[in-house]
Amino acid sequence: MITAKNIWKRYNDQVVLERINISVNEGEFVTLVGASGCGKSTFLKMLLGIESPSTGDLLLDNQPIRTEPDSDRGIVFQHYSVFPHMTVLENVMAARAFARKGFSGYLFGQAKRDARTAALEILEQVGLSHAITRYPHELSGGMRQRLAIAQALLGKPRILLLDEPFGALDPGIRADMHQLVLDLWRTYKLTVFMVTHDLKEGFYLGTRLWVFDKVRHDPQAPSAYGATITYDLPIGKIDTSLYEQIDNQLRPVIIPDEPSMETPTHD
């Protein structure tokens, strides 16, 4: 479904990504981990179509990915992308309205009734059917993120892109959101790409784990080389030692120098 062929991404003289070669089948759930600034979100933006490779090919169904978002791709960010002046129901219906061609973005007649029916159905599935008349400021963080997921799913995308969607949530709420996303992935038969800084989350969710890191370094030109995918691992088949190796690669433990035992001399 998705193929990347020797993708490089540069911003002027800074190389962010290099030598990305992957293929993803429809229905896979891929988690992307790596240190801050290693290009995970940049790759996600290329999948969405708001960034393009500097060189190389990124293909969807053997055709170049369109360089603008479309109904094939839905995205959920860490910071809730909802409209504060609209109710929960209006927010989800707006996702259908904005997908329509034309200038107004408004829904009328049967189109509006269909959008309301579809919105109520997806709000039931994400656990927000009791809150359809509330406004975003009346919702908890987990409820706002459920709302953002409902918006993304209303267009029935084939691909769901998640950019650290649970980073701002408390651990208990995150566990509930993990189960929700897994349920929706199976129900809608989605292909999912999720960026996370939490390695445990990356190992728990989905079917496949990518680790982004730099393998080439030049101290005199730190921007000369970019990150690539250093590990591409099937979830559930990773032993503890490899987990610890990757964890230390992403979060290296700094061992302080031993204090000197020499007796100081005095002139």
Image (spheres, rainbow, N blue to C red):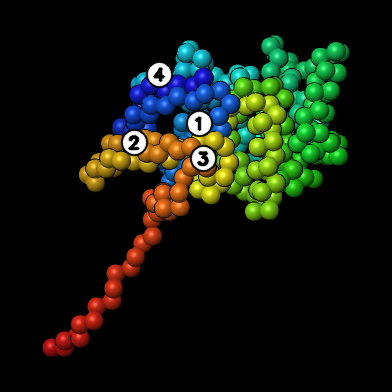
Residue at 80% across / 23% down in the picture? 118
Is the Cβ of the residue at disc 1 closer than 8 Å to that at disc 3? no
- The answer to whether residue 245 is left or right of residue 162 is left
What amino acid is labelled 2 in the image?
Gly
| Three-letter code for the amino acid on which mark 4 is drawn | Asp
Mark 4 and mark 3 lie on one chain; the one further toward the N terminus is: 4
Tag 2 residue: 226
Look at the numbered disc 1 and give the secondary structure of its residue.
Answer: helix
Mark 2 in CB contact with mark 3 (< 8 angstroms): no
Report the side of 144 relative to 68 (left or right): right
Q: Marks 1 and 3: which is nearer the front?
A: 3
Report the disc number at residue 177: none
Residue 124, image x, y percentages: 81, 33
Q: CA distance from mark 4 to mark 3?
A: 27 Å
Label 3 sits on residue: 235
Amino acid under label 3? Answer: Ile
Q: Which residue is mark 1?
A: 44
Marks 2 and 3, how far apart at CA: 25 Å
Give the mark, 4 or 1, whose residue is nearer the N terminus.
1
Q: Which residue is mark 4?
A: 57
Q: Position of residue 246 (x, y in %)?
A: 41, 48
